[in-house]
Image: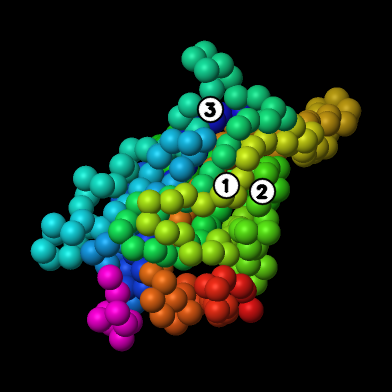
């Protein structure tokens, strides 16, 4: 089993801009300008925290007059699991690793946040391209979720490959959420998945060939972090993420 370069990350600015950052590219999708005058884009920022360390972030640069992202604030070469293994240590299936993930508000305004977690398997071809293997189960990539009373599971958007969580409270500037995960384990049952084929040789004997389905593949875990401002948050969340939520008088978020 190859650990590979396992993490992609993304963070987004309020309802005007949604951003997805990959290992070698960045793409921006612009939403309706209806809310442009209400968006404080110059002050928003959000970061992904892994085991107490900031590993990925995107902050809007106040000094950029044209309103573009400051590329120096986007560490596109960062990955999850950089400190997962000791030197010369091999990744072991079935072993439980610490993987405490949380979100930090690195901007200057309060915000609501959500995370998208993607789990899947790939086969890396000789030319370096990747083929996603849809017949291999994402459930064997076991990211253990915690604080489930605060991180709300969006059942409408969640699939075996994609898990969507919303933090139930405003995240003030400079503060960090409770972790939404604490450990990672790639289930050793993956080694039990085999395919057997039967052929007949020239002598007429039946030959059974056993192939391990997960042999030579890599798993991927991607974490995408999104944020919206608290002003008109209900409409902002609907406009940006297409999700209807309720905001209580004490500013608690709940999913409809």
Image position of 241 (left or right of 38): right
What segment is highlighted magenta in the picture? Answer: 32-40
Give the residue at mark 2: 146
Mark 1, secondary structure of its residue: loop
Residue found at the far bottom of this picture: 34
Q: Is residue 100 left or right of residue 78?
A: right
Looking at the image, residue 216 sits to the left or right of residue 239; the answer is: right
Mark carried by residue 84:
3
Between 38 and 108, the residue placed more toward the observer is 108
Measure the C-alpha gap from mark 1 to mark 3: 17 Å
Residues at marks 2 and 1 touching, judged by CB atoms closer than 8 Å: yes
- Residue furthest out toward the right: 205
Between disc 2 and disc 3, the foreground one is 2
**Marks 2 and 1, how far apart in space?**
7 Å
At numbered mark 3, what does the secondary structure look like: helix, strand or loop?
loop
Task: State which quarter of the image contains the N terminus.
Answer: top right
Give the Cα distance between marks 2 and 3: 19 Å
Instruction: Point out the tag, 2 or 1, that comes first from the N-terminus.
Output: 2
Residue 197 lies, with reference to residue 35, above or below; the image says above
- Residue 23 vs 232, above or below: the answer is above
């Amino acid at each position: 089993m190859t650990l590979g370069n396992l993490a992609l990350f993304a963070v987004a600015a309020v309802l005007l801009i949604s951003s997805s950052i990959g290992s070698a590219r960045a793409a921006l999708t612009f939403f309706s300008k209806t809310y442009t005058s209400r968006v404080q884009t110059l002050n928003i920022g959000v970061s992904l925290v892994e085991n107490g360390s900031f590993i990925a972030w995107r902050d809007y640069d106040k000094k950029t007059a044209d309103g573009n992202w400051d590329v120096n604030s986007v560490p596109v070469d960062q990955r999850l699991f950089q400190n997962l293994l000791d030197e010369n240590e091999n990744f072991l299936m079935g072993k439980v690793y610490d993987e405490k993930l949380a979100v930090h508000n690195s901007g200057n305004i309060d915000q609501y946040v959500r995370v998208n977690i993607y789990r899947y398997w790939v086969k890396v071809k000789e030319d370096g391209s990747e083929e996603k293997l849809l017949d291999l189960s994402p459930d064997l990539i076991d990211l253990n979720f915690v604080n489930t009373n605060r991180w709300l599971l969006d059942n409408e958007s969640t699939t075996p490959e994609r898990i969507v969580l919303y933090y139930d409270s405003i995240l003030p500037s400079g503060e960090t959420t409770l972790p939404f995960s604490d450990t990672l384990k790639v289930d050793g049952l993956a080694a039990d998945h085999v395919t057997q084929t039967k052929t007949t040789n020239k002598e007429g004997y039946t030959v059974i060939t056993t192939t391990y389905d997960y042999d030579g593949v890599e798993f991927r875990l991607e974490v995408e972090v999104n944020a919206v401002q608290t002003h008109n948050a209900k409409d902002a969340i609907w406009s940006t993420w297409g999700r209807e939520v309720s905001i209580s008088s004490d500013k608690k978020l709940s999913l409809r």
